[in-house]
Image (spheres, grey):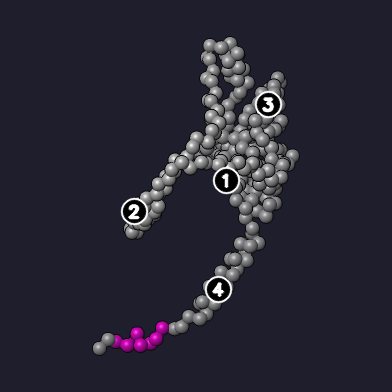
Amino acid sequence: MQPLGTSFALLGLICASPAQDVVGKSVSKWDVKIPEFESIADGTPSKPAVKPEPIAFNVLASRTRKMDVVKAPPMPGLPPVTGRINVTVRMVQDPGLPEPPKPLPTLDPEDPAVIARMEELREHYQGTSLIFLSASVYDHKRTLMRIHPNGDVGNEVTAWSNLDLNHLTGFSTYQVNDAVDGTPFYYSFIMGIGNENPEMLAKLSAKKDGNTSRRKSRSFPMSRKADRPLS
């Protein structure tokens, strides 16, 4: 799905860190976009993969034998799984399949083009910051966020938003350009998201309370025979 503009504004609030301009004032990074290496999903279903053509094997010889197999049980304490299976081995004529693609050649560290590209990456790429985000979305109208920058649980940030954070689930990396010099910063979300329906939860809670009350009303007093002394 396409992200909403307000969602990008929220992302700017989450990811922005103050930058100093020429007069020393604090400026936030608000130029937020999806990097070029991230694919954008517009919500339309992807086309099914092309099914490969079946290979017609010419069987030259075939041999079948029976085997007794014993497998470990799925849980300790259960009896093992045993049975007899048929194992068939067929020798076929070479179908003439194409050779698999060769691996890409390694880059020469002494190549001037490689050195120039690495220097460019070192100069412009500022690394990627990880944002561990737990989001509970209520009725697709508001979201409770618990944010751990770079996984630091001690610096948890808790906030409410009036946005549905399901709009941010289709992308993993975001690019935020510095408002002063345009330096790109990259933030990757590691987000766990859950959708809650308070109205449904309230109905289930009321139904549970009603069942508990009915069970209490049907309880019977203990027999007074238990009060008699033992002979």
**Which tag is nearer the camera, tag 3 or tag 1?**
1
Q: Mark 2 points at which residue?
A: 68
- Residue 224 falls within the magenta-colored stretch: yes
Q: Mark 1 points at which residue?
A: 192
Q: Give the range drawn in magenta.
A: 222-229
* Quadrant into which the N terminus falls: top right
> Helix, strand, or loop for circle 4?
helix
The residue type indicated by label 4 comes to Asn
- Residue 95 falls within the magenta-colored stretch: no
The residue type indicated by label 2 comes to Asp
> Which label's residue is closer to the chain start, 3 or 2?
2
Q: What residue is shown at x 66% (from left), y 23% (from top)?
A: 183
Residue 178: assigned label: 3
Q: Kindly indicate whether the residue at mark 4 contacts the one at mark 1 (C-beta within 8 angstroms).
A: no
Q: Mark 4 points at which residue?
A: 211
The residue type indicated by label 3 comes to Asp
